[in-house]
Amino acid sequence: MKYDYLKNLKDQLDRYQMEESEKQDILNDYDDMYENYLAQEMNESDIESKLGKPNKIIGELTEGYRRASQPQSNGHKLIAVMPFISLVTFFIVGFVFNGWVYGWTAFLLIPVTAIIVEMSKKDKEHMTTALSPFFAVVTFFILGFFYDLWHPGWVVFLIIPVLGVFNSRRTMTGLVLLTSLSPFAAVLAFVILGYYDLWQPGWLVFLIIPFIALFHEENKLSMFVSQALLVLGVLGYLYIINTYTDMSYYGLFIFAPFVAYSMYIGNIKIVSGEVPVGYRIVVIATLALYFIVSFLTGFWAITWLIILAIPVYSIIREVKGNERIISIMPFISVTIFMLLGFFFGWWAFAWMAFLLIPVVAILKSN
């Protein structure tokens, strides 16, 4: 966070005709102030609020200095003419090929060009992350319009967070990277299995997440026992649901040894003196509601949304100001998306719920 703040401040200063030594003095002052606030155990969000956003304080810091004139590069010229190129492309696709329905994607060339021109200079690695939403949109519409694969075609949007995680791999160990990517791999596998009406027992793929996470266990014996119990639970569950079809729900109790052992070694903590009462009540109530609703309705493929109440409660309790709704919005978007797709079959349109995330972030950003 400090690195990003100072980098942003430097970028703002570079737009003015100042001596490099003066710029460095300002950066050093803000670096020292940032460190002093950190020493006072302030969180980085409060620190940046106290220091002021670079684009808001730049006027005071550069008072009396003139903006530096910068010649327009070929890349910026291309950005300037791209709206006209996109408009011409749109009409050609529409009039010549009667592709009005998807021809509008030509306008995506405008932000794509800007990203390539700007990020190729200084942040090539994360350029793929920035381009991934446009790649996902185009791929999604190709799958939908030409192959009628709106569902499960929407899974291409998983490429956005996957690339975001992968492009941050330099700050992670291989195991941390694998652990971070495992939820996306599980979702992809689950959706593919669901497409072939294998929601049950397809949900078992989500157990790959705790299985991989257990590799972080320092005690190797505990790690081995936990993973073994988890694998035996999966095998036992598959045996029960294939042998006793009327007892499929009760097959979940086969995971009791894994849960009990995890509680014993401290990997699962439902009740702890360190956990506030509110958290304990929400966790227990949410899990109880999840199992009750799932057993009564049989909608295991969708009732897992109830569990999202736990992180949402945590955000409501811990996060303040505009950041609260920004942090909650991904959970709201996922819920809207799954409900519209699962109950109404609107997978082709439900993905637009994810647009709420950047829209709210823009509206609520200071």
Image: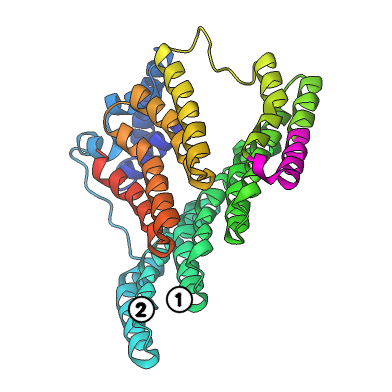
Question: What secondary structure is found at the residue carrying circle 1?
Answer: helix
The answer to which quarter of the image holds residue 102 is: bottom left
Q: Residues within 10 Å of mark 1 (few under 14, many from 20)?
A: few
Residue wearing tag 1: 145
**Mark 2 is on which residue type?**
Val
Give the CA separation, mark 1 to mark 2.
9 Å
Q: Is residue 165 visible?
A: yes
The residue under the point 36% across, 68% down is: 110
- Residue farthest left in this picture: 64
* Residue with the mark numbered 2: 101
Which of the image's four quarters has the C terminus? Answer: top left
Q: Residue at x 32, y 74 (%)?
A: 81
Q: Answer whether residue 216 is magenta in the image.
A: no
Q: Position of residue 41 (x, y in %)?
A: 41, 14
Closest to the observer: 49 or 69? 49
The span picked out in magenta is 231-248
The extreme bottom residue here reads: 96
What amino acid is at disc 1? Phe
Query: In screen coordinates, is 232 left or right of 343?
Result: right
Which SS class for mark 2? helix
- What x and y, as percent, mark residue 338? 43, 50
Asked if disc 1 and disc 2 are in contact, CB closer than 8 Å, the reply is yes
Q: Residues within 10 Å of mark 2 (few under 14, many from 20)?
A: few
**Magenta part mainly helix, strand or loop?**
helix
Quarter of the picture holding the N terminus: top left
Q: Position of residue 266 (x, y in %)?
A: 65, 16
